[in-house]
Image: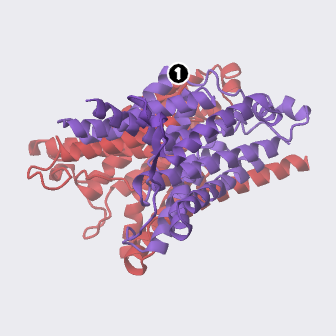
Chain colours: A red, B purple
Amino acid sequence: MAFLVDMLVHATPLMIAGLAVAIAFRAGIWNIGADGQFIAGATAAAWIGVSASTSIGWLALPLALLAGAIAGGIWAAIAAWLRSRFGVLEVISTIMLNFIATYGASYLVRGPLQEPTHVFPQTSSIVDGAHMPLLIAGTRLHWGFVLALLLAIVAWWVMKYSASGFRIRASGMSPFAARSAGLINVPRVTSGAFIVSGAIAGIAGAIEVCGVTFALYENISPGYGYTAIAVALLAGLNPLGVIGTGILFGALETAASTMQRSAGIPATTASVIEAIVILAVIGIAQFRSRRSVSAT
Amino acid sequence: MTSGTEAFLEGVVRTATPLALAALGETVTERSGIINIGLEGSIIAGALGSVIGAAHGGVWAGFALGAICGLAVAAIFALFAVVLRADQIITGTAVTLLALGGTGTLYRFIYGSAGAALSTPTLNTTAIPFLSRIPIVGSALFAQPSITYILYCLIPIVSWWIYRTHAGLALRAMGENPAAAIAAGVRGKRVQFSAVLFGGALGGVSGATLVLAQAGTFVEGMSAGRGFIAIAIVVLGRWNPIGAVFAALIFGAASALQFYFQAIGTDLPYQLFLAFPYVLTLVALAATRGRISAPAALGRQDLEVE
């Protein structure tokens, strides 16, 4: 039971960040920056969470989540703007922004946002109104998990049935065809998808602060943004599939941290497994497509 | 004051050396039309390899094992990206993840969780007679660990090889127009595979330099994004070996600034200096307006090179 709860708690940020990556990759945007967008979202949510007046009550929670989405969106927008205006490869820019976000959060929790006693590198605890309610009383499982499921279903519907979803998929599959046959403004669609992707990763960070940590720490993300790439790819970039792969990787990370404590197996082993999963997925896909080409 | 400037310039060259080594290798890789985002993985693998090699056979065994480890990581990338023509960005990201996690795991496996109890031999500074006495720049350029002098030798050799040999022409042709190159008899996959391996080996040497000429030990994740910065340096250097080295010096200066400011004492938060090279990468990439002079077929896994 404890393992199941831990698994779902771990799965929540992975599912949401996985959705963020899946949407960007579908648009042909290599957003490797979900980690930085996650940190930006967590920072904004913590800032709202500690500075909100207790008189606004539970309104602090939606405000914190909204702040997280905006901050994640802005962090992605920097890379989107560098890409559309200057042609900067988003792979490089998002990785640079991950480092900048890490150092930025490190500065804030040791500087302006540090808890009042100035002993620990963290913020004070967020107000009670910003806490994500628990899904099962007495456990750590919070409503953020349900929110992740809802986000996945909405993302799936939008990508599959809406006009914007079609534009995103078309731009990602063949920018040239999308422009000439579909009259789609490809740069605008891909930049939009990039920013939405960042906003979703920002929500993941905000939910982590409001549901699990209740404060901003250094290293708030143990590389969730990178795990999210494996989550999204293993799901075939399908938002509904992300639910399953997110839970799978949640189980993997939970098992890895348990093994580190009990058997001394380093938690870094989890990222080795993630990498092997990514390579296996793309390897098998390439192998199949080559075989089908040579068969025709 | 003079000694302060000299110390700063010496720091610039020292921090630029691993970046220049990695960027020089990646320049060759990208000239063949392949962008290896997994360079970061080669650097961290080279760092761990150098610790193991140096512990058993001295400093130069460390560099050799570092190069081999960097090459091995690049071989995994090449298997997927060159042979199977999988997406280069995804493959590179996965390879980086694999190497960062794998080195962390191996390091703890070999040296235990305490880790640091190692006595890794390191490379001393070797001053070149006469040249190192040139005012201001002398000690910066010619009182460095010998790996820096190896870099000085590599720059003209790689330049000459890219621009003046048949093999170099085949390499550049693969980056610009693979179909034409193959029609002319170039063995496309072999050229790209070798270019990736060369880049990986230099990435490994770069990681070994971090350990054997700078830190003196291995730390998990100590590559700290240098592979990605090196890729930005390749862009800044306009895919030219000499350009890459000058661009690496700019980044060396950005990193050395933090030591300089620490020395003179300042109230600015130290995270600002740590973040500075990454911010500079973004600004520099924007300023060069992206991919104008990039090899035309760079990153195009959809082009067949059979």
- Residue found at x 40% / y 69%: B115
Pick out the residue farthest to the front: B130
- Residue closest to the eye, A11 or A159: A11
* Left or right of B301 in this view: A92: left
Per the image, the residue denoted by label 1 is B288
Q: Is residue B57 above or below residue B278?
A: below
Could you say which quadrant of the image residue A277 lies in? bottom right
* Left or right of A94 in this view: B57: right
The image quadrant where one finds the N terminus of chain A is: bottom left
Q: Is residue A140 above or below residue B273?
A: below
Which amino acid type is marked by label 1?
Thr
Q: Is residue B90 above or below residue A192?
A: below
Q: Residues within 10 Å of mark 1 (few under 14, many from 20)?
A: some
Pick out the residue farthest to the bottom: A263
**Element assignment for label 1:** loop
> Which chain hosts label 1?
B
> How far across and down, in percent of the image, does residue A101 sit?
35, 41
> How far across and down, in percent of the image, does residue A203 sit?
36, 44
> How far across and down, in percent of the image, does residue B300 sit?
71, 35
Could you say which quadrant of the image residue A283 lies in? bottom right
Residue A70 in sight from this viewpoint: no
- Residue found at x 51% / y 37%: A92
- Residue found at x 58% / y 38%: B152
> How far across and down, in percent of the image, does residue B46 sit?
55, 56
